[in-house]
């Protein structure tokens, strides 16, 4: 079962060292070179739809709201994983839009762990998060569909490393899939 250190590890991989294009995640099986850029919009849209269905189904299940809010030892509940993905995809979209407009801009740091452990995540309603996470993924997909090959190679700076627009998309999709696995692990009894 994926552990909490793995949850932290995804941030390390993406935000501090950049994407290793040959990296395959042991937690969710996502391969950063496995999704062609041409498939990214459809993939992130599908991921958002899966999240919407999971959250809606579990929230309507008896005991589902409690299951979604149950904290792990590191304060990550299923709803926290969902909120993280909603926000991570939005951060990726903003970074992509910035990198398209400006030449090699600095990206503002974002600490997923700090966000996830804030109490505000726990009190967000699953149905609202379900709709928001799907919308966040659709927004990224629409942004992605407007990008040409040149835009995918544009870069921004984060922690002294260059991140390409294409890598930002891969990172967002990995976030969506990785945390989906972790969320399902937190709520095994209520998951469909
Ligand atoms: Zn993963």
Image (spheres, rainbow, N blue to C red):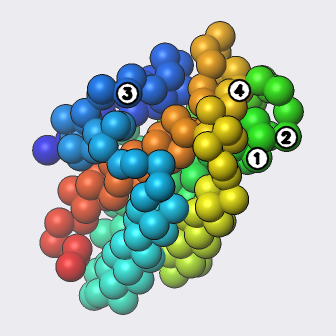
Which numbered disc flags the more N-terminal residue, 1 or 4?
Answer: 1
For the residues labelled 4 and 2, say whether their Cβ atoms are less than 8 Å apart.
no
SS label for mark 3: loop
Residue identified by numbered label 2: 101
Give left or right: position of 33 versus 84: left
- Give me the C-alpha separation between circle 1 and circle 3: 22 Å
SS label for mark 1: helix
- Give me the C-alpha separation between circle 1 and circle 2: 6 Å
Residue identified by numbered label 4: 156
Which numbered disc flags the more N-terminal residue, 4 or 3?
Answer: 3
- Give me the C-alpha separation between circle 1 and circle 4: 10 Å
Looking at the rendered structure, which numbered label has been put on residue 21?
A: 3
* Residue at the (85%, 40%) spot, across then down: 101
Image quarter for residue 9? top left
For the residues labelled 1 and 2, say whether their Cβ atoms are less than 8 Å apart.
yes
- Give me the C-alpha separation between circle 4 and circle 3: 17 Å
x then y, percent, for residue 192? 21, 79
Give left or right: position of 105 versus 59: right
Residue nearest the observer in this picture, 26 or 162:
162
SS label for mark 4: strand
- Give me the C-alpha separation between circle 3 and circle 2: 25 Å
How crowded pointer 3 is (Cα within 10 Å; few <14, some 14-19, many 20+) is rated as few
* Residue at the (60%, 26%) spot, across then down: 163
x then y, percent, for residue 42? 45, 66
Q: Residue furthest front?
A: 149
Is residue 38 among what the camera can see? yes
Is residue 126 among what the camera can see? no
* Residue at the (36%, 89%) spot, across then down: 60
For the residues labelled 4 and 3, say whether their Cβ atoms are less than 8 Å apart.
no
* Residue at the (45%, 26%) spot, across then down: 19
Residue identified by numbered label 1: 97
């Amino acid at each position: 079962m994926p552990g909490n250190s793995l949850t932290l590890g995804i941030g390390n991989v993406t935000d501090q060292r950049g994407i290793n294009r040959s990296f395959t995640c042991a937690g969710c099986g996502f391969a950063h070179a496995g999704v062609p850029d041409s498939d990214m919009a459809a993939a992130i849209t599908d991921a958002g739809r899966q999240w919407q269905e999971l959250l809606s189904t579990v929230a309507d299940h008896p005991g589902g709201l409690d299951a979604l809010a149950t904290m792990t030892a590191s304060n990550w509940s299923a709803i926290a994983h969902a909120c993280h993905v909603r926000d991570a995809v939005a951060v990726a979209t903003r970074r992509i839009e910035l990198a398209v407009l400006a030449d090699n801009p600095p990206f503002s740091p974002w600490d997923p762990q700090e966000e996830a452990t804030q109490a505000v995540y726990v009190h967000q309603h699953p149905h609202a998060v379900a709709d928001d996470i799907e919308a966040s993924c659709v927004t990224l997909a629409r942004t992605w569909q407007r990008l040409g090959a040149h835009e995918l190679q544009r870069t921004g700076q984060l922690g002294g490393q260059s991140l390409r627009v294409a890598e930002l998309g891969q990172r967002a999709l990995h976030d969506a899939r990785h945390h989906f696995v972790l969320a399902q692990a937190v709520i095994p009894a209520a998951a469909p």
